[in-house]
Structure formats: structure tokens, C-alpha cells
């Protein structure tokens, strides 16, 4: 078995951490037991480009239990947990190509190595694997039947490909499932981002001005958690509806240039490019802390920051201090990469339970319906979304009401009024 990881000797620690994560992933555990019995993925090859974490390991174990031949590479150079990668290789015999801190050349080489499996299905987080397939490995496209995409950034790219008519196989937008983005993006990103910022800086959040750039589901979660820790949260937005919602939720809303002058902490969660730019860095307070929790580090104009940087030094792991020409110091966390995985451990396993349950069931769905899907981006089937929600409620020992026959009739009727 071919693989490329940091150190196989760390497999024991990784195995224990995977077991710990599995204790909080009851829905995926139930799916794994069924997959082991039914083997719905038997004979299929899956190339997965995901954050190599304990929760991802649980997903890989589930896919293998279902009969699939699986290979895993990283979807971000800083998100790999090396002991987890080692455990998957040693204990689960799953090929992994991922090393935390790998350079860009190694990162893409690992994607190519994962694609050497000649996948019938792809599983992506950010669409780097899909874009590599469509640009550098087009010879493999004829053998690909379908795929899934985990995150907002990737779906934006895939919908652009579909609109331009270049997407060569159907992909399910797992991120858009309600059991994914309403929970993973909001509660997972909210907690893990604050965790990453605190781990890397050990600075007090309470009493600070905490600027959140973007008020989508990730921004909402981050703003909620930052406020819960006592900060004065400021939202910057380009969408008038999202900005209005932020204001109604009790947050201050202002342009980034205004926020740049008063912020202590800054974190981008927009999925867009150059949200915090050179002109913003110039007016920031001395000692401002800058982070990103979007998928790619392009949300911060790091090139523009370098141009006005007089000197640079590493103050702590994942903290790079830039002394500007004006004498002010700007601290960039995790090289601008998603801080919740660069400096922390990513989302809690209990919320990834639903996200990865969507991944597993959507691959099964595509295997069963491969002949009926066009080359487009599809939503998660509603029945899968509801099934996962019901399983999660059951695992939490929660029960809900059911509609009576009379209520069902009323909801389906137009004639019953006052």
C-alpha cells in the first residue's frame, strides 16, 4: 500500500483519538454498522480530499465498511492531524497522502497520488480535487460517476463550473443540507474558530472588539460564540439582507475600513477574496490579531500585507508578527489558513456526525441512482436530510410530535379558512 504521512509511529495516539471522536458520532456509527452488513459501496473506488481529522477518519472507516476502496488526501496544507493519518494507514489499511504543514507542491502532488486510484466517486472539501481532475487529469474523467462536496467555497466553484458547462459529472452539494450547514457551519465553526484563536494567542476575548467579516452561517456562529465570551462583536457585510439580520441580532454593523480602526480581533468567514486588504492593515491598532476561518487563505490580502511589512517574526506557534512601515504590529494567525484546523482540532465530533452522515448516505445514493443524474450540482435529497435529523434526535434520546390525520388534511387543503 502506497502512502505519504509524517510518522507511522504516532498511529497509537491517533487510534485513541479516533475512538474518542467515535463516541460522539452515533449517527455515523449506525450507518457504519448497516454498511458493514449490506456492503452498498462494494466494488467502488472513492478518492477523498478532506481535512484529515479524527472525524474524517470515522467517515473513511464507514466507507470502507460499506465495501468501497478508499484513498484520502488533505484538502488544506495545515489541517492534517498527523497521528490520525498514521492510524488510518496502520490500523485501517487506508492509503493517506497528507502531512501537516506540507508546501503547495506537495499538497497538489498528494491530490494526484489520490487520483491514481482512478476514482469512480470523488469526495471533496473545497473542490481542489475536482478542479485538478478537470484541468490536469482529464484522462480520468470518463471513469468518474459522481461526487460530493463538503463546503461553501467548493460549491461556489462547482456551480461556476456547471454554469460554464465544464463540469463533467454530477456532484451533490452536501454543504447545503440543513443537517449540515445549520449545525456544522454555525455551531461547529463558531466554537472551533474561537478555540483556534485562543489556543494560538492565549489572549482574552472578553472586553475586546471582535470583528467578524461575513454574516453567513459560519459568521453567525462565530459572532454568537464571540459575544458569549464577552466581546463587543462588529459585523462587516456586502449583502444588505445579511447586514440587516446582523443588526437585528444585536450586533454593530459597519464597513471594514471603519471596523479596521477599532478592532482587536479580526476573522474572515466570507468565502471571497481579499476581504481584509492593505489599506485596512495600515489603519489597524498596534497588536491587532488577524485570522481567517474560510476554506482558503485568499480572504486575507497577505501579499498586500507583505508589501508594507518592514520585518516579520514568529512570536508563537501559528502567530506571525508583521511590523509595518508605520511601526504598528499586525499578528496573522496560521498563515491566514482556516484557524480552527491550523491551530485547533476543527469542529467537535458531535456536529461532524451529521455532516459526514450526509457524505456517506449521499455516496450510497449516487451509487444507486448513477444513471439518472446529469452533469450538474444537486441538493442533498430531502429524505436523506430528514433521516439524519431523526437519527440524531434518537441518539440524543429526544422525541417530537407527529401530525394528526386532521392536521395533515388541513395543511393539504385550500378550502378551510376562518
Image (cartoon, grey):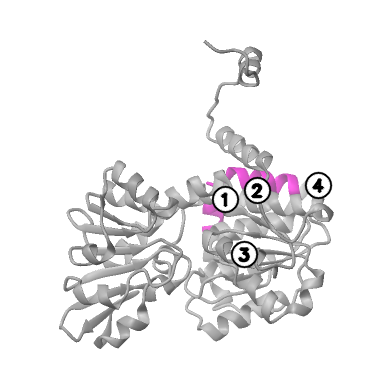
Residue farthest toward the top in the current orientation of the protein = 418
Task: Check disc 2 and report the residue beneath it.
Answer: 380
Is label 2 in a helix, a strand or a loop? loop
Q: Is residue 264 visible?
A: no
Residue 211 is labelled as none
- Locate residue 78, reporting x and y percent: 47, 73
Q: Residues within 10 Å of mark 3 (few under 14, many from 20)?
A: many
Task: Check disc 3 and report the residue beneath it.
Answer: 158
Residue 20 lies in the magenta stretch: yes
- Locate residue 318, reporting x and y percent: 35, 74
Sequence-first tag of 4 and 3? 4
Q: Is residue 194 visible?
A: yes
Task: Check disc 1 and report the residue beneath it.
Answer: 176
Check the image and report above or below for 122 versus 226.
below
Q: How far is mark 4 from mark 3, CA to CA?
A: 32 Å
Check the image and report above or below for 394 versus 365.
above
Q: How far is mark 2 from mark 1, CA to CA?
A: 7 Å
**Chief secondary structure of the magenta span?**
helix
Amino acid at each position: 500500500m502506497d502512502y505519504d504521512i509524517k510518522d507511522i509511529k504516532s498511529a497509537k495516539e491517533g487510534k485513541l483519538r479516533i475512538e474518542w471522536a467515535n463516541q460522539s458520532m452515533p449517527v455515523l456509527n449506525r450507518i457504519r454498522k448497516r454498511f458493514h452488513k449490506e456492503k452498498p459501496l462494494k466494488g467502488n473506488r472513492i478518492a477523498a480530499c478532506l481535512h484529515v481529522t479524527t472525524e474524517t477518519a470515522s467517515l473513511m472507516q464507514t466507507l470502507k465498511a460499506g465495501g468501497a476502496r478508499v484513498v484520502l488526501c488533505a484538502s488544506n496544507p495545515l489541517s492534517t492531524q498527523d497521528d490520525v493519518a498514521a492510524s488510518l494507514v496502520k490500523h485501517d489499511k487506508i492509503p493517506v497522502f497528507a502531512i501537516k504543514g506540507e508546501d503547495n507542491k506537495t499538497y497538489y502532488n498528494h491530490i494526484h497520488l489520490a487520483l491514481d486510484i482512478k476514482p469512480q466517486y470523488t469526495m471533496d472539501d473545497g473542490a481542489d480535487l475536482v478542479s485538478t481532475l478537470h484541468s490536469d487529469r482529464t484522462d480520468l474523467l470518463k471513469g468518474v460517476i459522481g461526487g460530493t462536496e463538503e463546503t461553501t467555497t467548493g460549491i461556489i466553484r462547482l456551480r461556476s463550473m456547471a454554469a460554464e458547462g465544464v463540469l463533467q459529472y454530477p456532484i451533490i452539494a452536501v454543504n447545503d443540507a440543513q443537517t449540515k450547514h445549520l449545525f456544522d457551519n454555525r455551531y461547529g465553526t463558531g466554537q472551533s474558530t474561537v478555540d483556534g484563536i485562543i489556543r494560538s494567542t492565549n489572549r482574552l476575548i472578553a472586553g475586546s472588539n471582535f470583528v467578524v467579516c461575513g454574516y453567513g452561517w459560519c459568521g453567525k456562529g462565530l459572532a454568537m460564540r464571540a459575544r458569549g465570551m464577552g466581546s463587543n462583536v462588529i459585523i462587516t457585510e456586502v449583502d444588505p439582507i445579511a447586514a440587516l439580520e446582523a443588526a437585528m441580532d444585536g450586533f454593530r454593523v459597519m464597513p471594514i475600513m471603519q471596523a479596521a480602526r477599532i478592532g482587536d480581533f479580526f476573522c474572515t468567514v466570507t468565502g471571497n477574496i481579499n476581504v481584509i486588504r492593505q489599506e485596512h492593515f495600515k489603519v489597524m491598532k498596534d497588536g491587532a490579531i488577524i485570522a481567517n476561518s474560510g476554506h482558503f487563505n485568499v480572504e486575507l490580502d497577505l501579499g498586500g500585507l507583505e508589501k508594507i511589512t518592514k520585518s516579520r517574526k514568529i512570536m508563537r506557534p501559528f502567530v506571525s508578527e508583521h511590523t509595518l512601515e508605520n511601526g504598528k504590529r499586525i499578528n496573522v494567525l496560521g498563515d491566514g489558513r482556516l484557524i480552527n484546523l491550523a491551530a485547533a482540532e476543527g469542529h467537535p465530533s458531535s456536529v461532524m456526525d451529521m455532516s459526514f452522515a450526509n457524505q456517506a448516505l449521499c455516496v450510497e445514493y449516487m451509487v444507486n441512482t448513477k444513471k439518472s443524474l446529469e452533469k450538474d450540482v444537486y441538493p442533498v435529497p430531502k429524505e436523506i436530510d430528514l433521516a439524519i435529523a431523526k437519527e440524531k434526535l434518537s441518539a440524543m434520546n429526544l422525541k417530537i410530535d407527529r401530525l394528526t390525520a386532521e392536521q395533515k388534511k388541513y395543511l393539504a387543503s385550500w378550502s378551510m379558512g376562518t
